[in-house]
Image (cartoon, grey):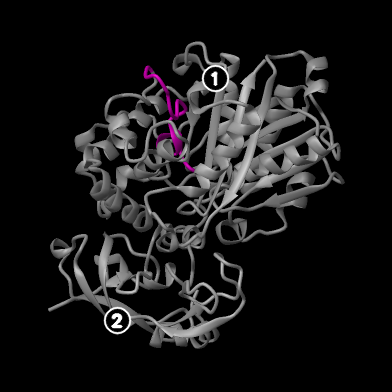
Amino acid sequence: MRDVAIIGIGMTDFGELWNDSLRDLFVKAALDAMDDAGVDHIDGLVAGCMSPGLFAGQEHIGSLLADYLGQAPIPGVRVESACASGGMALRTGIAYVASGMHDVVLCGGVEKMTDVSGAQATYALATAADQDAEAFHGATFPGLYALMATAHMHKYGTRREDLAQVAVKNHDNGMLNPHAQYRMKITVDQVINSVKVADPLNILDCSPITDGAAAVIICPLEMAKKLKKKPIVKITGSAHATDTIALHQRADMTWLKSTADAAAQAYKQAGVKPSQIDFAEVHDCFTIAEICVLEALGVVKKGQGGKATREGLTARDGKFPVNPSGGLKSKGHPVGATGIAQIHEIVTQLRGDAGKRQLKGVKRGLAQNMGGSGGSAVVHILEVL
Amino acid sequence: MLTPAIVRRNTPQRYRMEAAKCAKCGKVFFPPRLICDACKSRTFKPYTLPQEGTVVSHTVIRTAPRGFGDEAPYCMGIVELTDGTRILCQIADCEPERLEIGLKVAIEFRKIQEAGESGVIAYGYKAVPER
């Protein structure tokens, strides 16, 4: 297996982009990444997208995107793992490059969510839940994460304010990210008093509906060394794990087993312990998710995610900064693009290009991207050489 | 998605809570599966779930999905039945203030969705607090 490096990154602004179609969003991010890498040709394309069919009435987007990027007849494919589709696109591309099948591969993610009504978008997102055992009964995604939150608060004494602090912290970071959808400061009181969605989660505990795309260019590490254009970012860990997608069928509804399983593999591949990771971009689709992810990644012990957040561990100036980009909460969550946008932020930070939100002295970052209520998880570890 | 074909196919689970018990290791699956994830056996015995349980987590859905708009807000929970099997369902006839972990509930046959896209009325189970 060949080592793999990231040589180019690109993304669109995240937001309600009414003038941009799904294909235009993807191509903008892809061209941005190709320009950054300094390549005018790619050998393959992998696009992460959760539901182009339900959000945009379009399937068969692997070919569509390769064509509109001016790269046909290269192989182009869409991969799907609900909200972890972006992370899956990178992992799939890595398999192409590591195996020697292709050399220069574009791994992108895109979701065009505002062409449909809020109710239709909610329906499309809910298809990531178990249709027979969850959605049939009227469960929503905020509802499933709310069940996790209620259980976590009961079992570990996690406070309502701890959940809110995740959103407050991520907005503080997102304010400094020019690509972010919601660049405004919020307070714990505002989160707790915002409109109720699924108790105990309110609207400011939830990531928004967003249009956007992101892309990265990967190639064999040896080829990247010859280009020597920008600091080389090596992918040292890439892991994926699945779990039962119905929350109630898991042994412990507060434990994100798929994330723990993927992280364990990624740490082993990279030869590192959680304490050797400098910062992370994680899947804060709802505030409780970030708290549970901290525990599943082994950053804190089981049940300590809320307390650690309260004490500032994950703030930009904390010992283990989490979501310096603003996370899904502030930056926005165009579902299929999210996993690649996380990689975009980690590479930006490792290159020292993050401007006002730049973290000091970071060499190694982790990305955790999750599907549904944790039925799938993808973890990547990146290091700057 | 709710179509007549789906409603008909799921009737044993939704109307009668028919589960499957692994003939080898005894693990209960609801809805039934074709292979046991614990011992990999493919032989199951028919098994009907008990009709009482305890709420192990809960929420109040205030923003409802398509088909449930008229009902919001409504209570939902994960219920651990007396045999240890967990199910997700609505908790009916229950004020949100009454929701708590440990609440004893009974399972009742109720209307779930007023009418699906194809006009079918879907029935199933909901939990109600023990009186």
Location of residue A340 with respect to A55 vertically, above or below: above
Q: Which residue is depicted at the point 56% across and 34% down? A: A341
Q: Which residue is depicted at the point 37% across and 82% down? A: B124
Please state which of residues A24 and A190 is positioned toward the viewer in this rendering. Answer: A190
Q: Is residue A190 magenta?
A: no
Location of residue A334 with respect to A162 vertically, above or below: below
Q: What is the chief secondary structure element of the magenta stretch?
A: loop
Q: Position of residue A263 (x, y in %)?
A: 55, 38
Q: Residues within 10 Å of mark 2 (few under 14, many from 20)?
A: some
Please state which of residues B66 and B12 is positioned toward the viewer in this rendering. Answer: B12
Secondary element at tag 2: loop
Q: Does the image show residue B111?
A: yes
Residue type, label 1: Gln
Left/right of residue A90 with respect to residue A197 in the rendered view: right
Q: Tell me the quarter of the image containing the N terminus of chain A.
A: top right
Q: Dot 1 corresponds to which residue?
A: A349
Q: Dot 2 corresponds to which residue?
A: B51
Q: Which residue is depicted at the point 23% across and 34% down? A: A188
Left/right of residue B78 with respect to residue A299 in the rendered view: left
Q: Position of residue A35 (x, y in %)?
A: 73, 24
Q: Tell me the quarter of the image containing the C terminus of chain A.
A: top right
Q: Is residue A332 magenta?
A: yes
Residue sitting at the far top: A361
Left/right of residue A209 with respect to residue A157 in the rendered view: right
Chain of the residue where label 1 is placed in the rendered structure:
A
The stretch of residues the image draws in magenta is A317-333
Q: Position of residue A336 (x, y in %)?
A: 58, 46
